[in-house]
Amino acid sequence: MTRMDAALDAGSTPAASTIFVKRTNYDYGFKMYKHLEETNMTYMQHYIRSTKFALWCMKMYFVCLVHAVFPFWFTDTFSNEVKTLTIKLEEEEIK
């Protein structure tokens, strides 16, 4: 029985922040390391790759936004970029 479970059984109510910190720090830490092992990446490799995806998404957001206002600009940009990204991800999966 954990300390928190004992406190709840005794009728006291721990602060919500205590419950949040106690429960999620372990859970997120374990899930993070499990995910990194599954992807076979270090933390920094994962961080850099995720950041590149985020920047790509931001770039595509602006491309689509401009295209929405000016349909004659960036007519094939988004679809070409998605195709390129798909090819890169498939190549990564094969390695």
Image (cartoon, rainbow, N blue to C red):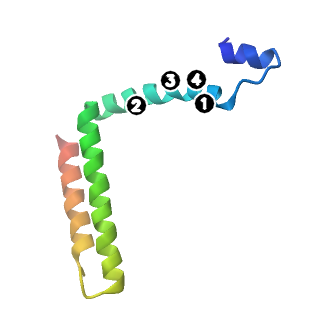
Q: Amino acid at mark 3?
A: Tyr
Given the image, on which type of amino acid does mark 4 rest?
A: Lys
Q: Work out whether mark 2 precedes mark 1 in sequence or the reverse, and give the earlier one.
A: 1
> Whole-Å distance between the Cαs marked 4 and 2?
16 Å
* Residue that numbered label 1 is attached to: 20
Q: Secondary structure at mark 2?
A: helix
- Kindly report the distance in space between the C-alpha atoms of the residues bearing marks 1 and 3: 10 Å
Name the outermost residue toward the right.
11
Q: Residue at x 32, y 28 (%)?
A: 37
Q: Are marks 2 and 3 in contact (CB under 8 Å)?
A: no
Marks 2 and 3, how far apart at CA? 10 Å
Q: Which residue is mark 3?
A: 26
Which residue appears at 58% of the width and 23% of the height?
A: 22
| Quarter of the image where one finds residue 10 | top right
Q: Which quadrant of the rendered structure holds the C terminus?
A: top left
* Element class at badge 1: helix
How many neighbours does mark 4 have within 10 angstroms: few (below 14), some (14-19), or many (20 or more)? few
Q: Is residue 63 above or below residue 3?
A: below
- Residue plotted at (29% across, 67% down): 60
Label 1 with label 4: CB-CB less than 8 Å: yes
Which element type, helix, strand or loop, lies under badge 3?
helix
Q: Is residue 3 above or below residue 27?
A: above
**Residue located beneath label 2 in the image:** 32
In the image, which is nearer the foreground, mark 2 or mark 1? Answer: 1
Name the amino acid, label 2. Met
